[in-house]
Image (spheres, rainbow, N blue to C red):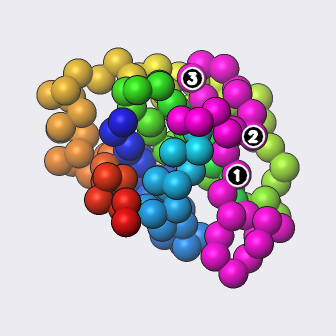
Amino acid sequence: MRVYKTKWFGRWARREGLSDRLICVAIREVERGLVDAALGGQLVKKRIGLPGRGKSGSVRTIIAYRAGDRAFCLYGFAKSQKDNIEKIELEGLKKLSRQLFNLTEGELRRALQEAALSEVRCHEQDT
């Protein structure tokens, strides 16, 4: 399973204190079917607790997930900011998900080189 995060998600995750290790833990849970909601269009909503904040200080993430293939961390928000995403946001995320899953290996490499995406190395996070 290859895991990526968009440039926007990466900046947001750093601000929130969401580490790659926590992203990897969340992706492993998604692989086991532990999601907060299936949103359609290969999107899932996954809540992630942050260290020292407990569940009330958790963040919600929207992940484009294709079993056994790839996962793209697309969007996140603090639980304290809002309960859910708007319908128009969901439609945009579904469109983005389709575009990302349709990338060829060459296009994916280019997106990584241009820093539009970054890879989360989960196998390196295992201890």
Left or right: 67, with 55 as reference point: left
Left or right: 2, with 66 as reference point: left
The total of numbered circles placed on residues is 3
Q: Give the amino acid type for the residue marked by disc 2 in the picture.
A: Asp
Name the residue carrying label 3: 42
Could one spot residue 46 in this view of the protein?
A: yes
Q: Which quadrant, please, contains the C terminus? A: bottom left
Examine the structure image and report whether residue 40 is included in the region drawn in magenta: yes
Residue 105 placed where, x, y %? 19, 26
**Foreground pick, 52 / 32:** 32
Could one spot residue 100 in this view of the protein?
A: no
Name the residue carrying label 2: 36
Q: Determine the image quadrant of residue 80.
A: bottom right
Q: Earlier in the sequence, mark 1 or mark 3?
A: 3
Is the residue under label 2 in contact with that under label 1 (CB below 8 Å)?
A: yes
Residue at figure coordinates x 27%, y 51% from the top left? 115
Q: Earlier in the sequence, mark 1 or mark 2?
A: 2
Mark 1–mark 3 Cα distance, whole angstroms, equals 17 Å
Q: Which residues, given as a range, are shown in magenta?
A: 31-58
Residue at figure coordinates x 80%, y 43% from the top left? 84
Residue 33 placed where, x, y %? 64, 33
Residue 111 placed where, x, y %? 25, 40
Magenta segment's dominant SS is: strand
Q: Earlier in the sequence, mark 2 or mark 3?
A: 2
Mark 1–mark 2 Cα distance, whole angstroms, equals 7 Å
Residue at figure coordinates x 65%, y 70% from the top left? 50
